[in-house]
Image (cartoon, rainbow, N blue to C red):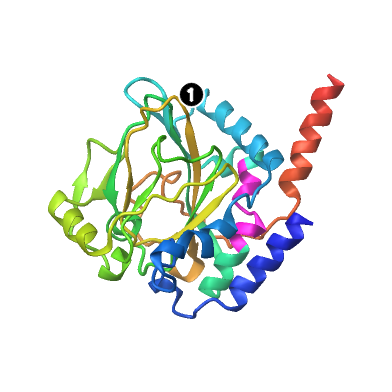
Amino acid sequence: MQENTMRDYLNNVLENMPKDWLNLTTHRLDIYDESLAKTQFLEQFENLFSAEEVGVLKESAQEIYQSDREEVWRESSGAPRTAFAAHTYDTAHGLLGSHPRLVGPVMQLLDEEVYMHQYKINAKAAFDGDVWQWHQDYGTWQRDDGMPEPRAMNISVFLDDVTAANGPLLFIPKSHKKGVVEAGHDLETTSYPLWTLGRDKVRELADEGGVVAPTGSAGSVLMFHGNLVHASPPNISPWDRVIVYLSLCAVSNHITQFNRAEWIAHRDFTPIVPKPDNCLQELARELANKSAAE
């Protein structure tokens, strides 16, 4: 019943989505009063994935973090920082990367088929999770990958409860309206080369738009524009904060430069075919049955 209610809600959102969606923020603050933004938009995306679905994704993420794959990058402490391209080598994350609850809405928003530009599992580890500097994702996609236009959507899926204490994402509302802003190529503090904003520019944007930090329970989802300026602080709390990020790009808008590793900026522009809605549930039950039989 809850799944049907959520699907009905998503269908209603998509039917009434403004055509000018690229001018929306994570919270759709341009449509709603800021004080009501969470209850009128983000709250509806809380618990989009069930505890059963989150469980199989989280277990897979932990196994990936324990591996020595080149796609897994670590903090100076040795704690995992991020795992790239898990949808290409892990069953559960392969299903999430083509899940209809994520891919379907983006296809409708962009009005065409999409491919996976980037897939990351970011581990803001308890006590050790370090800062991600202020940046625009599209700023890097344009400069380093030659993505023609910001016709790509970021989706984040919480695999842990995200609170004010464990390094939540920080967003500057309305900053996406500035287009690609001036940035420097940070080669030292972000674990991989990223175009980050200077303090004066961040202060200027924040003075105009403020800063918000969406929180939510595991299984919640955020969608945000590629030009929306965001960051995340260190996690010095005793609680992990794992979030999966999908960057879905319109196929016609695929990248044209190949300066970064293929598992960071994908070169397979094949349109994603959404899986059945219950694919993660079926996998979780299959694994549970297998474990019980052993």
The span picked out in magenta is 93-103
Q: Is residue 158 left or right of residue 28?
A: right
| Lateral position of residue 17 relative to residue 262, left or right | right
Q: Main secondary structure of the magenta part?
A: helix
Question: Callout 1, which amino acid?
Answer: Asp
Residue 204 visible: yes
Check residue 110 for magenta coloring. no
What residue is shown at x 41% (from left), y 62% (from top)? 35
Q: Which residue is mark 1?
A: 68
Where does the C terminus fall, quadrant-wise? Answer: top right
Residue located 25% across and 69% down the image: 178
As for residue 100 lying within the magenta part, the answer is yes
Q: Can you say whether 254 is above or below 217 in the image?
A: below
Residue 57 place in picture, x, y as percent? 62, 38
Badge count: 1
Residue situated furthest right in the rendering: 293
Quarter of the image where the N terminus is located: bottom right
In the foreground, 186 or 20 = 20
Residue at the extreme left: 200
Tell me which corner region of the image, top left, top right, bottom left or bottom right, holds residue 12.
Answer: bottom right
Q: Quadrant of residue 174?
A: bottom left
**Dot 1 crowding, Cα within 10 Å, few <14, some 14–19, many 20+:** few
Q: Secondary structure at mark 1?
A: loop
Q: Position of residue 93 (x, y in %)?
A: 61, 42
What residue sits 30% from the left and 70% below the top? 177
Residue 97 on image: x %, y %: 59, 50
The quarter of the picture where residue 126 lies is top left
